[in-house]
Amino acid sequence: MIFLGTAAGDLIPSPFCECPICAAARKSGERRHKRYHSMLLLDEENLIDFGPELGAACIEFGLSLSRLRNVFLTHFHEDHFAFSLLPLLQMARTDHPKLTFWMSAPARAAIEGLLKSAGAMGSEALTLQIAKMAPYYTFRTLEAYVETAVDDMRVLPVAGHHPGYGRKEQALNYLFTLADGRRLLYACDTGLYPARTLEALAGQKADLVVMEMTFGSTVRAPGDHHLAGETFVSQLRALLACGAVREDALVYASHIGHKTEWDDDALTRYLAENAPVRAHLAYDGLEIE
């Protein structure tokens, strides 16, 4: 399991920004301070999200996706589904599995609508390209709170508190029961969970947690669609209280943004001093056994 990216939508450093976080990251000689858009490769067959830097991350970390079978999309935003990468599927010289993208019904409708409208733009070359890509992938729908078997995993999608581009779309977060029996809760993107999601996760006792902490030091308004440091901690407490997460779980903060006064060292200190269990700041290239 490896983090291919750990940034929020703005990247770190964000290319058009000279804020203190971005300026320091840009000057730093340490790779951990530079972040691609959030993606997590579970194993050689399963990936969470399909961000714009997927190819760059594979090059940098020496990875092949030639055995990839499933991509679990949290929602349709450009940092989580980069449809411009789809042509890579038909550019390979060697065989690879047909890729299945799993997503909510509103996300699927929006993405399929986008591809359809692109094909109707009147460009013969673009229409041909979309047709050439089509045999290499398929879209499948997941319903929040309905567990589905996917190959040798069980996947329970739950509703996050974060709208996507689809009509009435709310991001899906995922509880994966992996082939080895461990459970992973992937909680990006989301604000504080609605009651129904906490109820669905109650007693699940996740062994691994990856949860967003987009806004760091920033105090967010009630009902915000992302987590900051304070709400990361309160959400983790709620998950522990309902038994969704084990007391000895491995917890990682990801989906880190630059709209904060805390650099990586300050984020790490905050987690050490405030998280109810030991929590780590994820970085690109970090591997979890």
Image (cartoon, rainbow, N blue to C red):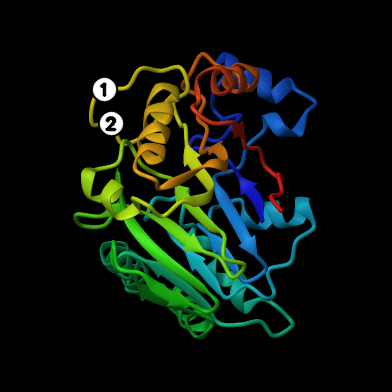
| Rendered location of residue 151, percent (x, y) | 53, 79
Outermost residue toward the left in this view: 168
**How packed is label 2: few (under 14 Cα within 10 Å), some, or many (20 or more)?**
some
Disc sitting over residue 32 in the figure: none
Front residue of 33/279: it is 279
Compared with 17, 279 (above or below) is: below
SS label for mark 1: loop
> What residue sits right under mark 1 in the picture?
221
Q: Quadrant of residue 30?
A: top right
Tag count: 2
Compared with 160, 103 (above or below) is: below
Q: Pointers 1 and 2 in contact (CB under 8 A)?
A: yes
Tell me if residue 68 can be seen. yes
| Rendered location of residue 226, percent (x, y) | 36, 34
Q: Residue at x 36, y 61 (%)?
A: 157
Front residue of 15/30: it is 30
Q: Is residue 256 left or right of residue 30?
A: left
Q: Residue at x 69, y 74 (%)?
A: 66
Circle 1: residue type: Ala
Q: Is residue 94 left or right of residue 167?
A: right
Q: Is residue 179 left or right of residue 94?
A: left
**How packed is label 1: few (under 14 Cα within 10 Å), some, or many (20 or more)?**
few
Front residue of 183/88: it is 183
Q: CA distance from mark 1 to mark 2?
A: 6 Å
SS label for mark 2: loop
| Rendered location of residue 112, percent (x, y) | 33, 71
Front residue of 126/9: it is 9
> What residue sits right under mark 2 in the picture?
224
Q: Residue at x 23, y 25 (%)?
A: 222
Circle 2: residue type: Asp
